[in-house]
Amino acid sequence: MREVGHILFGAVFTTGVSIALGLILMRRLGLVWHRMEAALLAFVAGSGCLSFMTALLCLVHQARRGVFLWGGLAVIGRAIWEERREPRRKPLPAVPFGWLLILCLIFTIFFLCYFFNAMAPETSPDGSGYHLGNVARMWKHHGFAWDFRGMYVYLWQGMEMLFLVAFAFGGHSAAAMVHFTFLNALPLLMVTYGRRFGFPRAGAFGAILVYATPVIGVDGVAAYNDLAVVTLIFAVFYLLQVWDELKSSNILLLIGLLCGAALAVKYTAFLVFPLAFAFAGWRGARLRGLVLLTASAGVVVAPWIVRNWIWAGNPFAPFLNAWFPNPYYHAGMEKIYVDGLSHYEGIKHFWEIPLQLTMRGSLVAGVVGPAFLLAPLALLALRSRHGRQGCQQQARQCQARQRHARWLLTAALVFAVPAYFNTGTRFLIPALPFVALAMGLGLSQSPGVLWAVALFHAAVSWPAVLSTYCDHWAWRIPSIPVNAALRREPEWPYILERVGDLNLKGRIEQAVPPGETIFSFAGRPEAYIDRDIVVQYESTLGNLVQDILQAPDAHPPKHLQAFQFLPVTARGVRVVNLAAAANFWTVAEMRIRSQGGELARTPGWRVSAWPNGWEAPLAFDNSYTTRWSTWQAMSPGARLQAEFGKSETLDSVWLECDPAREAKVQVEVLTERGRWVAITDTAEHSTVDLPSGIRRAASRDVKALGIRFLWINDSDFCAADMKNYSKFWGITLLAEANGTRFYRID
Amino acid sequence: MYWGIVLVVIAGVSTIACGREAGSFPPPAQLSLDLGPDPGGPRSLVRMNDPDADALIVRDISPERGETRWAFLHPELRLSVADARHLTFSAEFAIPEVTFRVTGPVTVSCFLNGRKLAAMRCGHAGDYRLEQTVPEGLVEAHKPISVTFEANPRWVSPEDGAQLSFLLRSVGFTHAGSPQAGSPKADSTKADSTKAGSTQAGSPQAGSPH
């Protein structure tokens, strides 16, 4: 039970500090709120502040338990002291008793289910993978681990900053509990929204719909960030409506802060700032207000922009690498990754998508529940009833409802845009609160229908019921692990049962000295393994190791392109591609020859390339397993070149490569006058016999990159070859379990 | 508002302007190219549990790796020798009790490049070693050598008609006076040789089981 206490303390302390920071900020801004919304908005705004401050601590490696504890207690103390001097806040208009009853009932039942799942040992794929993997790494270094590079560490980590505070006291589950706090804050915020703006039934209906939604539940109890981002987005929307009534510039400052915090939590919130700016501008915000909005958003994201710009050479890493070329993440890999996320796998017809999203869930990772098939009914909220109502007050209410419905539906459309780039159901979560509220408004004229839909949704979203109709592999809460949550059941067997890779944890940590890295083609539960893992698609280093390991089978450079020309004296030579194609252009070795022999590569040479010039030396290292690649779609002007530092006579250039049929290559030489002159684009093509030992060369070259350990799944490309020919690879099997093998390079 | 937009544009443009360029590098250290054998490369002797045995099997030998593999209808392997002089061919195989009970005595013939080298009559179940000096000119150095076997009679499955010849353990060439030449596992070859009965094809001892 002591562990349970640590977990709860970590989560409650992080939430408490967030609320305290938020209350202090609100007071400084002179913003007055009603009772319930004050606490909720303080939590949301304060979490942005806490995340920002923790990021600053990580930059200077002072993310330590003592700093969190004493700093947090000071903030909480200050907030309590200030709050005692505040007059008692007014309550919001009440929710009708019937709705309050049903809301409390459903909320309590689902709360218990979610609570025990969030408290249980964290085993979610991304949570135990990179979210908490990053947190564990940062905790080890008390800040950002600058020597570890990967796409997931470049992501702005607003949520991980909150996780880090909780993790310092309660470990993995405490972090998940922080996310769970956002899961609870969102529906409460929706209720207060409905109460504040005069449609409490719709607010309660929307809250029930959102809180019971299966994908929101399973996501919210894990150490993910989707519920945090949607709560921040909804808070921005909420505050924009408040600002529209009060027109206070300080509210715009708060909105800017939340926009920045949302973006810092997840890039998919990239539309929240433009939307807020456009709304404020359109609704008559003054220049000061817009500057405050922009500046506060800018301040919150500044640590991430600065960190990535200096560290990775790309403020928006791991995206926009074509705009910000850098040696740490290939633009082509980014495209492959993004393309992979934006395609529905296994869906044959368009009409399958709504069914998958609402009821099936295996092909889109999660379901929102069949009640959302009624989402088009939200359009009913746009109906005009002025003529029939007659009464002026009702007409005003109707207009207000229409206005809110318009904004809600606009927000739903805007925040559904990220789902176009990622087909996972959880990428629709930011749109769901708006859809649910709009549905509530649309059906509010038929209270019986509202009740029925809310109860139906809650019933069919309950885990046991859900399992009767969704696909077996749909991502969802499978059970309520009370014993595991309360640690009456040992933690480790529970984790091992769900994360098979961890069966190798002990042997890996025993075999791999601290500080050494492991290569893997697939992501691993990094949060639980005390060694750094370089994953194939997560970094340039991962790409290089993958490319090398696949060279023996996938692309041995047996293709020789020989460009012959009359002897010429030049200071350099380059090969330039003139064609455009989707494939990468690669060269394993570029050999410059004269009189039948190769010119020796002397230290006076300078080799370079564009694009991806950082890897140009790989075409001049005399190894057949390494190669220079554009690592992006080939385009005219791509080149690979060597300058000799003095004049040399040459008469041919050989390119040894995996054939790139689309490439149209010409050879250019650098004259004494410093001009590049094209001399031939005609090559003789032939196949060459490679020297033997390419597997051993591959393992040698991987080792030269600093990686001595390989963690291979049986389904990986070279797994069978490594298993059959480990002697030829020069690797030794150290352990195997659950279809994975762990090798050491000898 | 105007200035806000201008600020955003300036900030955006300034970020775009700051992409890195790689520059140029001296050539890296030159790496060696020849790092030893590849699986499936020229081999003069193969054991069925060698990691690269699959690469030397042409047809009709079972794929699962083990001490022995089933030879089916027309088993064939492809070997190679660096020196074609003074060669001795050897093959280790077994006639299992279970097939022998059905087939009775089996004659196993061996062919190099389609020409018959030797034949052995296996009068009972057990392990056998066929060994025969290779006539000069029958094989050439550095060229693929097709090694085929024929067993007569073969065991025929009553269910699907599949035919089993024998269990093959190893096949290869050695040089006179250097029995393990060309074998990457010389010790184990030698050890196994002592287990198997060594007989000259056609000799009175041929087919002595152990």
Image (tube, rainbow, N blue to C red):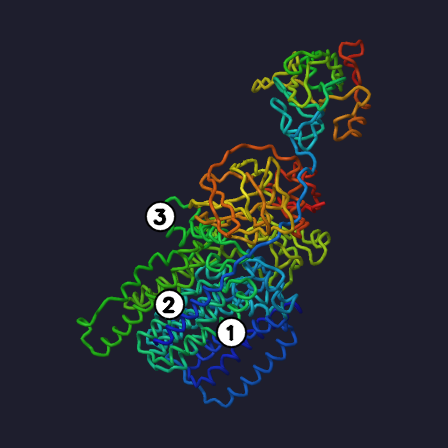
Across and down, in percent, residue B125 comes to: 74, 17
Can you identify the residue that label 1 sits on? A47
How far apart are labels 2 and 3 at the CA level? 29 Å
* Quadrant of the image containing the C terminus of chain B: top right
* Quadrant of the image containing the N terminus of chain B: bottom left
Between A42 and A368, the one nearer to me in the picture: A42
Labels 1, 2: one chain: yes
Tag 3's secondary structure? loop
Q: Identify the image quadrant of residue A241.
A: bottom left
Task: Identify the residue at image location x=27%, y=70%.
Answer: A402
Can you identify the residue that label 3 sits on? A350
Q: Is residue A670 left or right of residue A451?
A: right
First along the sequence among labels 1 and 2? 1
The answer to whether residue A124 is visible is no
Can you identify the residue that label 2 sits on? A205
Task: Identify the residue at image location x=56%, y=81%.
Answer: A76
Badge 2 sits on which subunit?
A
How far apart are labels 3 and 1 at the CA level? 39 Å
Badge 3 sits on which subunit?
A
Q: Is residue A100 left or right of residue A380?
A: right
How far apart are labels 1 and 2 at the CA level? 26 Å
Q: Residues within 10 Å of mark 1 (few under 14, many from 20)?
A: many
Between A153 and A209, the one nearer to me in the picture: A153
Amino acid type indicated by mark 1: Ser
First along the sequence among labels 2 and 3? 2
Across and down, in percent, residue A538 comes to: 55, 54
